Image (cartoon, rainbow, N blue to C red):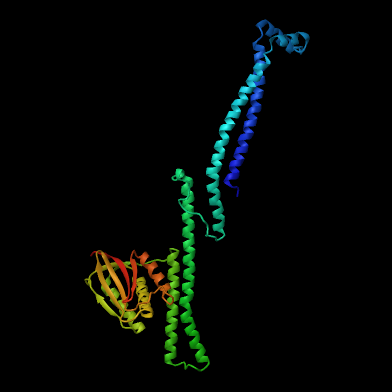
Amino acid sequence: MISIRRRITGLAIAVMSISLVVVCGAVIVALWGYAMRFKANMPPAVRAEFARLEAIGQDESARGIEIYVRYRPRVGELALMIGALTVGVLIAVMLVVPVIRSAQRHLGNPLDDVAAAARRVANGDFSIPFEANAFEANVEHDSLSRLRNDFASMIGSLAAMQAEQRRDAANIAHELRTPVSAIHLLIEGAIDRVLEPDRTWLGNLREQTQTLNRLVEDLRTMTLARVGQLQLQCREEAVEALVSRLVDDWSQAMRQSIDFRCNISADALVWVDSVRLRQILANLLNNAFRHGSPPVAVQLSQVGSKVCISVLDAGAKHPTAPGGDRLGLSVVRQLSALMNAAFELQCGQRGSVASLRLPARER
């Protein structure tokens, strides 16, 4: 790709070439003016005589030379004409060259920086010292500064996205390691006859496969949400009945005791996808039981125009520390944003509170 600086240099060469052509043209015009001035100096009778001599090819005869010597313009006049035209062209060139150099400095450098950065970004290198708002203050609001700053912002966004993808890959590997290792040990124990494949063994295997299936579904959900392909089926739901049913289903499936507290009216409505809300609650409850301490409770409350669904536990371990359910919380954040809900996680020595705030709807 030809850089902007090279293009401007080519423009400067073109201007110089045009200036040279103009100087040559000025000389030709001066010579033509000299010839016209020569004939204008003749009396009418002499001009007619010289024209007859030219017509018969005798303009270089003795009489023609005599007329030329007598009526020709002075050489100083010709020199003055050529000099005036040349000086005018040189002045024009002197005015154009600084403009081109200034354009090369103010246009070429920033755009060359953008071009060089674009090549590095295309190769996957986002470690570019290319800060937004770093352009000169006197051109802060022009299109070049906006282009440069917007490109710098784009690089920052791409770098953040790449870092997030790397964190997600590490989280996925960490989350999958536990159920895969457990299944491997169960099968290996059965092969070595250390473990008997009885109902307890099958129950443990089913529990690990359920965990693995949940992680795969979370990964699929997060991927679809990130690329904008996750379709929600939202509708009005009575939040107390819905959350109570989801909590009961999860409690029975996982054989865990959950305290359900409702501090809102029974007819409170929310606009929500019940399937995705089930996925959110399942992730929050799994996180509470895996990384917190009982008792675990689900509480419904009204905060202004929001319905708040909170999962509380008595543990002190931060869920994003090593061993925390980081993939599950990433899915919760993605789904919350899609349902226009606010998700907040507070951790302390006396336990953690994961809150989901949904806009309440009027009947």
Q: Is residue 209 above or below residue 86?
A: below
**Left or right of 255, for residue 262:** left
Front position in the image: 321 or 29: 321
Of all residues shown, which one is farthest toward the left?
A: 265
**Left or right of 171, for residue 117:** right
- The location of residue 326, given as percent across then percent down, is 42, 73
- The location of residue 155, given as percent across then percent down, is 49, 57
- The location of residue 71, given as percent across then percent down, is 69, 10
Total count of labels: 0
Q: Say which quarter of the image contains residue 29.
A: top right
Residue at image coords 63%, 38%: 13
- The location of residue 94, given as percent across then percent down, is 58, 32
Q: Say which quarter of the image contains residue 70.
A: top right
Q: Is residue 153 above or below residue 260?
A: above
Q: Say which quarter of the image contains residue 246.
A: bottom left
Of all residues shown, which one is farthest toward the right?
A: 62
Q: Is residue 52 above or below residue 291?
A: above
Give the quadrant of the C terminus.
bottom left
Front position in the image: 147 or 127: 127
Residue at image coords 25%, 76%: 261
**Left or right of 91, for residue 28:** right
**Left or right of 14, for residue 300:** left
Of all residues shown, which one is farthest toward the top?
A: 45
